């Protein structure tokens, strides 16, 4: 009788654990993983800090395909808060050109948050990081969405301006709502303003955005992927004067960011690799836990057309492309020998 009573709770506990694994509360693994599509290790597999050098000066930024990160500074706070593992400097040097920055506003102070989770940084650290990067790589540009989070003052404009003067400089910014050309954008921080007040740069709402971030459980990942797929398919034929922004990130009570990214990033990687026409604009592809190889795939969509035009004059591939190819061959060799041993 007693053993039967004991077995009841044990069986119930086992069923609960299985359900939690299914919906993503436990997820796939706590160990660091570095795959071609997903990377939650501390450092990128390879860097590509100056990939925008090859983009013609007269090309509108709205026609550039680039990788971005969702909740760029969300490195702390546990599985429900963490969206990245690379530092801001590492992300920029790996090729990220769109940053998603959330600030909490308290008495003029702007601390970085993801929800309730403080990210051990303030807005000045972000500005310093971007300014340092653009000083070292003036061929590049950085787009940065700025949004208030975990406070509801609806009045962060003055604090943002104050931080810009204190931690960067006014001329670092692109001061227009208009989409710049690549030549105009080089060396500039383009603020995508997601808060009220006078213009600091472009308005975030002027972009064509797909951000269906609610993924209640891992059973809803396919719905999330469908949203991503449809927006990426629409981007090449969409308004070329408008920047397209597609978020592949998602989360919910029973599907935390890491678990969603481990699944969605694989689908995104396969989708990009399967594309036969690489001369098309996809816009900004914004991810949680991106890996260097999937970022290279995104970057190469933009650069392949230019490379084809330049093949007659310069047949040498870029350093980053060579690193990506070597990395890919190494992984395939390891996989081959593992299967055949």
Image: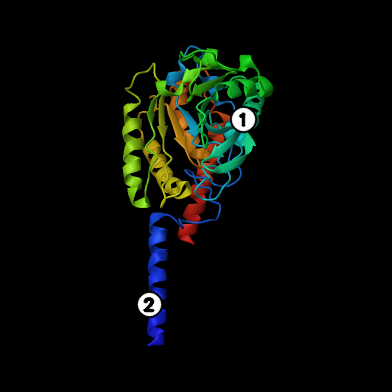
**Percent of width and height locating residue 238:** 33, 22
| Disc 2 and disc 1 in contact, CB within 8 angstroms | no
Q: Sort mark 2 into few (<14), some (14-19) or many (20+) by Cα contacts within 10 Å.
A: few
Q: Is residue 180 left or right of residue 279?
A: right
Along the line of sight, which residue is nearer the eye, 296 or 189? Answer: 189
**Figure disc tally:** 2
The answer to which of 329 and 260 lies nearer the viewer is: 260
Please name whichever residue, 262 or 58, is drawn nearer the observer in this view of the structure: 262
**Which residue does the numbered mark 2 point to in the structure image?**
8
- Gap between marks 2 and 1 measured at Cα: 54 Å
Q: Position of residue 52 (x, y in %)?
A: 54, 23
Q: Residue at x 33, y 51 (%)?
A: 219
> Residue 43 got which mark?
none
Q: Residue 328 at what x, y percent from top left? A: 50, 43
Q: Nearer the viewer, mark 2 or mark 1?
A: 1
In the picture, the quarter occupied by the N terminus is bottom left
Residue ID for mark 1: 107
The correct choice, above or below, for 185 with respect to 234 in the image is: above
**Can residue 286 be seen from the camera position used here?**
yes
- Disc 1 crowd rating (10 Å Cα; few below 14, some 14-19, many 20+) is few
Residue 109 placement: quadrant: top right
The reply to whether residue 243 is visible in this rendering is no
Q: What SS does tag 2 mark?
A: helix
Which of the two labelled residues, at mark 2 and mark 1, occupies the earlier sequence position?
Answer: 2
């Amino acid at each position: 009788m007693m053993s039967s009573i004991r077995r009841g709770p044990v069986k119930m506990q086992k069923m609960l654990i299985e359900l939690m694994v299914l919906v993503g509360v436990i997820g796939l693994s706590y160990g660091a993983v570095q795959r071609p599509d997903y990377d939650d290790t501390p450092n990128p597999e390879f860097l590509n800090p100056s990939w925008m050098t090859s983009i013609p000066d007269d090309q509108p930024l709205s026609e550039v395909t680039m990788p971005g990160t969702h909740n760029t500074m969300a490195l702390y706070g546990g599985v429900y808060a963490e969206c990245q593992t690379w530092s801001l400097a590492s992300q920029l040097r790996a090729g990220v050109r769109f940053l998603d920055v959330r600030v909490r506003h308290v008495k003029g102070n702007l601390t970085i948050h993801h929800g309730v989770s403080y990210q051990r940084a303030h807005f000045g650290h972000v500005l310093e990081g971007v300014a340092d990067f653009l000083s070292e790589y003036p061929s590049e540009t950085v787009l940065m969405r700025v949004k208030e989070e975990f406070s509801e003052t609806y009045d962060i404009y003055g604090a943002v301006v104050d931080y810009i003067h204190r931690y960067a400089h006014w001329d670092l910014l692109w001061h227009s709502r208009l989409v710049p050309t690549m030549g105009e954008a080089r060396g500039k921080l383009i603020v995508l303003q997601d808060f009220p007040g006078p213009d600091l740069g472009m308005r975030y709402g002027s972009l064509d955005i797909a951000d269906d971030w609610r993924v209640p459980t891992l059973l809803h990942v396919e719905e999330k992927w469908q949203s991503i797929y449809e927006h990426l398919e629409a981007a090449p034929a969409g308004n070329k004067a408008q920047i397209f922004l597609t978020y592949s990130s998602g989360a919910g009570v029973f599907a935390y960011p890491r678990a969603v990214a481990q699944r969605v990033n694989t689908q995104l990687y396969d989708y990009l690799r399967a594309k036969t026409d690489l001369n098309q604009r996809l816009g900004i592809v914004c991810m949680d836990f991106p890996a260097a190889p999937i970022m290279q795939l995104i970057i190469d969509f933009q650069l392949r057309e230019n490379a084809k035009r330049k093949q007659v004059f310069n047949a040498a591939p870029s350093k980053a492309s060579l690193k990506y190819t070597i990395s890919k061959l190494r992984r395939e060799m390891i996989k081959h020998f593992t299967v055949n041993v």
